């Protein structure tokens, strides 16, 4: 038996579909690879993937083998984006996952396993043009790739690279990466090596660098924009909506006398008699501790400031500006999300916490139920 969750995340699949459509329209005729690593940034990979397939996603990008296997039965191309471990190669080859080649050794392992299984494995070269994480360094790419393409059992279909600062509109660094990548493509072409799949753009690049979704590129890879979120810096070429609303309920309402301390650490003392509500969500649900004494929630259309420190399971908010008849125990509380001016954005939380939207979206707690509002 299980009871209804006190905290739930509403994920609007219609908004997801609309966000996808807007991205696809901008990058047309390029294909959109939806990046669904970490369980679709914590939102639940299955319903998100199903919606995106119906909307026309080309395929999926993930971080690790389990994520890849969870999407293998969709019939869409599934690509591990950064690195594959030697121990993952047999299952990945068997399942037909598109594998990243980040050096010659890994290429040889994939080749050997593919031959052993009697398969041809689709692979893409990951070029490090300035990310400094994994990949074949751009300066070594032409020589290294020229050798790898001779290995048996590999279908070297693609080549790609990734941006660390594409949120900085017009940054020389990003233009420099694009130039390095072009030089690799040109050098390989001169040797007769070309690719069916060529891509660099992530969400930031789609918003800030239009050359990354024009020829010679064939695909873009986007994650955070599908959820309607952006980096705090940079342009927002795309007009997207957040897919998320985090909700909970009012557990108790009291009027406390002036001088009452609120919450752990006694970080807030009421200056006057104040009506307050305890709401049933805390940092275990993903409310950043940084909202303590700084954030607010929405109850029946009223903004209610957070008083004191956020606890693990509860948060106290002021009802000072809420008419007495407008709120009662059990009412819904919007912690994040909402409509128009009556909303609290992922980016607002990110700014208060001194982080980015990715960390906010990936941080909803395990007891937070995921409820999906239908796409149609
Ligand atoms: C290689 C690669 N491409 C694309 C993405 C998608 O990034 P974003 O969510 O910023 O669109 C990621 C995610 O970090 C990635 O690692």
Image (tube, rainbow, N blue to C red):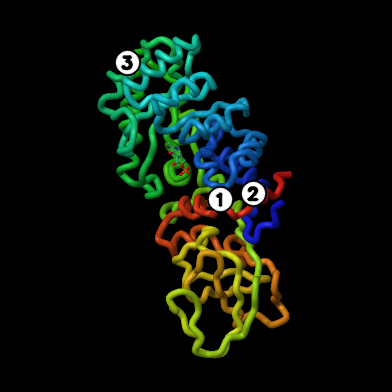
Whether residue 326 sits left or right of residue 262 in the image: it is right
Please name whichever residue, 215 or 283, is drawn nearer the observer in this view of the structure: 283
Q: Residue furthest left?
A: 139
- SS at circle 1: loop
- SS at circle 2: helix
- The residue under label 1 is 228
- The residue under label 2 is 15
Percent position of residue 184, x then y: 32, 25
Residue 141 sits in quarter: top left
Q: Earlier in the sequence, mark 1 or mark 3?
A: 3
Give the vertical position of 123 relative to 165 (above or below): above
Which mark is drawn over residue 146?
3
Give the vertical position of 182 relative to 119 (above or below): below
Local packing at callout 3 (Cα closer than 10 Å; few below 14, some 14-19, many 20+) is: some
Whether residue 51 sits left or right of residue 176 in the image: it is right
Percent position of residue 66, x then y: 51, 33
Q: CA distance from mark 2 to mark 1?
A: 8 Å
Residue 111 sits in quarter: top left
Percent position of residue 140, x then y: 26, 24
Whether residue 9 sits left or right of residue 359 in the image: it is right
| Identity of the residue drawn at 49% across and 23% down | 92
Please name whichever residue, 266 or 179, is drawn nearer the observer in this view of the structure: 266
Q: Are marks 2 and 1 in contact (CB under 8 Å)?
A: yes
Give the vertical position of 205 relative to 179 (above or below): below
Q: CA distance from mark 2 to mark 3?
A: 44 Å
| Identity of the residue drawn at 53% across and 48% down | 238
Whether residue 165 sits left or right of residue 336 in the image: it is left
Percent position of residue 61, x then y: 50, 34
| Identity of the residue drawn at 70% across and 69% down | 330
The quarter of the rendering in which ligand 1 is drawn is: top left
Local packing at callout 1 (Cα closer than 10 Å; few below 14, some 14-19, many 20+) is: many
């Amino acid at each position: 038996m299980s009871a209804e969750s006190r905290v739930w995340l509403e994920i609007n699949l219609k908004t997801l579909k609309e966000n996808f459509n807007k991205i696809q329209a901008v990058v047309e005729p390029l294909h959109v690879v939806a990046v669904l690593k970490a369980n679709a940034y914590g939102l639940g990979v299955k319903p998100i993937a199903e919606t995106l397939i119906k909307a026309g996603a080309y395929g999926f990008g993930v971080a690790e083998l389990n994520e890849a296997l969870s999407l293998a039965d969709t019939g869409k191309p599934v690509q591990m984006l950064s690195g594959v471990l030697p121990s993952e190669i047999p299952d990945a080859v068997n399942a037909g996952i598109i594998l990243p080649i980040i050096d010659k050794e890994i290429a040889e392992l994939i080749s050997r396993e593919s031959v052993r299984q009697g398969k041809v494995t689709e692979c893409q070269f990951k070029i490090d043009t300035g990310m400094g994480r994994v990949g074949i360094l751009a300066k070594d790419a032409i020589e290294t790739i020229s050798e790898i393409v001779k290995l048996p059992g590999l279908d070297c279909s693609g080549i790609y690279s990734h941006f660390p600062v594409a949120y900085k509109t017009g940054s020389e660094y990003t233009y420099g990466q694009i130039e390095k990548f072009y030089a690799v493509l040109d050098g390989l072409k001169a040797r007769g090596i070309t690719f069916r799949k060529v891509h660099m753009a992530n969400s930031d690049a789609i918003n800030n660098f239009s050359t990354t979704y024009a020829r010679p590129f064939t695909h873009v890879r986007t994650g955070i924009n599908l959820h309607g979120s952006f980096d705090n810096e940079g342009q927002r070429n795309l007009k997207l909506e957040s897919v998320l609303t985090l909700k909970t309920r009012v557990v108790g309402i009291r009027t406390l006398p002036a001088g009452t301390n609120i919450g752990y650490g006694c970080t807030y003392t009421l200056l006057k008699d104040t009506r307050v509500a305890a709401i049933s969500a805390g940092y275990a649900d993903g409310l950043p501790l940084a909202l303590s004494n700084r954030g607010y929630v929405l109850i029946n259309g009223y903004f209610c400031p957070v008083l004191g420190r956020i606890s693990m399971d509860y948060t106290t908010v002021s009802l000072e500006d809420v008419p007495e008849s407008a709120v009662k125990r059990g009412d819904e509380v919007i912690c994040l999300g909402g409509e128009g001016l009556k909303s609290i954005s992922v980016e607002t939380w990110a700014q208060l916490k001194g982080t980015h939207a990715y960390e906010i979206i990936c941080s909803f707690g395990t007891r937070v139920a995921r409820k999906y509002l239908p796409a149609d």
